[in-house]
Image (spheres, rainbow, N blue to C red):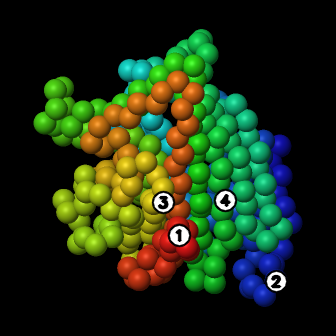
Amino acid sequence: MLCIAALSKAAGEGAAHAWRQTGTSLSLCDGAKTVWCLVADPEIPKAYFHPLATPDGDALTAFEPADHPWHRGLWWSWKFINGLNYWEEDRETRKSEGVTELTGVVFKPGDDFSARAELSFSYHPPGQPAVMTELRELSITRPDADGSYRIDWTSGFKAGNAPVTLGRTPLAYEDGGKSYGGYAGLSVRLVSKPKAWVVRTSGRGNGVADVHGRNAGWMGFSSGGSGIVVIDHSENPRHPSPWYAHDSPPMSFFSPAVLFNEPLVLAAGQSLEFRYRILIHSKAVTEERIQAECLDFDPPAK
């Protein structure tokens, strides 16, 4: 049953926020508008955020577009694990060759309209034990006065009792390679029309051609002031990450693609952790503002 919290105003703020929670989702609402929604449903192959929107209800993410129905807002998916495809799904059954099984969910909505969530996953071939597990911890801030909010995302993976190879579609210059190779991991599928996206990374100019496959500490897509920035933590494997970026209608997509240049192998029992900050903003943000977010998320060691 859908449970809707009574509308209430946070101290000192004019906006009326409310929680909407079901057995498989948690949403922050501003009046009748959804600011963000986290879905963790065992019947859907991967957990995801959609919509991610500005507080005035301007959705920035796309959900199950016809060209790639396994693209769901902001989500995580490996491509190949030990040669099995965990990314694409059969269009009728919605199942992949490899199983991303949701094994645990805890939603923690806060009285101040921030939230936390803990999700656990098992990655395995159909009907077989886990080859790798994941504990995902999510922390979402309440919207600031300027309409921005943040998702701090931590994914901790652990290989089972045998080595694990995390692979991707090879790049064009490799054997069996494709022009679109290299993607896997944390991913964002953005709305297309009528958006005209400006693409930026740390230290580079605008446009996909200038940023695709390049290493950078962050990447952002914005349009008319609103947008999404993903920040790569300095302790992540292969930091600064190479980035996968595509912006050709109808598909606008980007990802800190840790496997872009080569696969990654975990020894039996080995752990691997990734941390990202996702900044959703309603107004234009300068590079200086993004750098301040980077320092807040990932302060220099003392």
> Looking at the rendering, which quadrant does residue 129 occupy?
top right
- Give SS at disc 1: loop
User: Could you tell me which residue is drawn at 64 percent across and 40 percent down?
Assistant: 135
Q: Earlier in the sequence, mark 2 or mark 1?
A: 2
User: What whole-number distance in Å separates the C-alpha atoms at marks 3 and 2?
Assistant: 32 Å
Number of numbered labels in the structure image? 4
Q: Quadrant of the N terminus?
A: top right
For label 3, the residue is 233
Q: Check disc 3 and report its element: helix, strand or loop.
A: loop
Q: Earlier in the sequence, mark 1 or mark 3?
A: 3
Q: CA distance from mark 4 to mark 1?
A: 22 Å
Q: Amino acid at mark 2?
A: Ala
Tell me whether circle 4 and circle 3 mark residues in contact (CB < 8 Å).
no
Q: CA distance from mark 2 to mark 1?
A: 34 Å
Q: What amino acid type should be assigned to the residue bearing mark 4?
A: Ser
Residue corresponding to mark 4: 139
Choose the circle earlier in sequence order: 4 or 3. 4
- Quickly name the residue at label 1: 301
**Mark identifier at residue 11:** 2
